[in-house]
Image (cartoon, grey):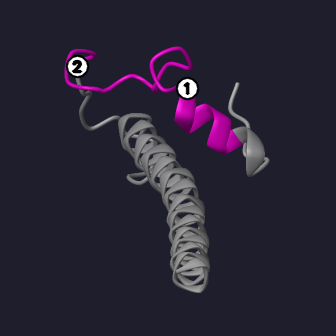
Amino acid sequence: MLKLKEEELTKFKNDAQKYIFEKKTEMRGAKTEIVELYEIVKRQKQTIDNVEDGKYDGGIKSFSISKDDKQPQPKREEFPFLYKSLEKSKKIVS
């Protein structure tokens, strides 16, 4: 009886360790992904700003996008996980 309980406990411990490892791996991947997505958003914003400033057509400002149509940069207080991930990846944004 005691041996059976020890085997159950060992199996439970191994299953728990496997689960924790999988979740930690998943979280690392999610943190990397969120930082990479933020970098894409930053580059898209820069491209839009460059188009508006005429950097792609010889300095002629061909059009302007209204402020209502442009999305603001994510705010630190609204996206704490994003900024925590950026700080950890050393891509801190002011």
Q: Amino acid at mark 2?
A: Ser
Majority secondary structure of magenta residues = loop
Give the quarter of the figure containing the C terminus.
Answer: top right
Q: What crowding class fits label 2: few (fewer than 14 Cα within 10 Å), some (14-19), or many (20 or more)?
A: few
Residue 3 to residue 78: above or below: below
Q: Nearer the viewer, mark 1 or mark 2?
A: 1
Q: Look at the image and say whether residue 79 sits in the magenta stretch.
A: yes
Residue displayed at 49% across by 51% down? 34
Residue displayed at 24% across by 33% down? 63
Q: Amino acid at mark 1?
A: Pro
Residue 38 to residue 19: above or below: above
Q: What crowding class fits label 1: few (fewer than 14 Cα within 10 Å), some (14-19), or many (20 or more)?
A: few
Residue stretch in magenta:
67-86
Residue displayed at 79% across by 47% down? 90
Residue displayed at 26% across by 27% down? 64
- Distance of mark 1 from mark 2, alpha carbons? 28 Å
Task: Say which residue label 1 marks.
Answer: 80
Q: In the picture provided, is 71 more to the left or to the right than 59?
A: left
Q: Nearer the viewer, residue 9 or 53?
A: 9
Residue 53 to residue 46: above or below: above
Residue 45 to residue 80: above or below: below
Which residue is outermost to the front?
A: 1
Q: Nearer the viewer, residue 57 or 51?
A: 51
Q: Earlier in the sequence, mark 1 or mark 2?
A: 2
Task: Say which residue label 2 marks.
Answer: 66
Dot 1: what SS?
A: helix
Which residue is outermost to the right?
A: 90
Q: In the picture provided, is 82 more to the left or to the right than 72?
A: right
Percent x, y for residue 87? 74, 39
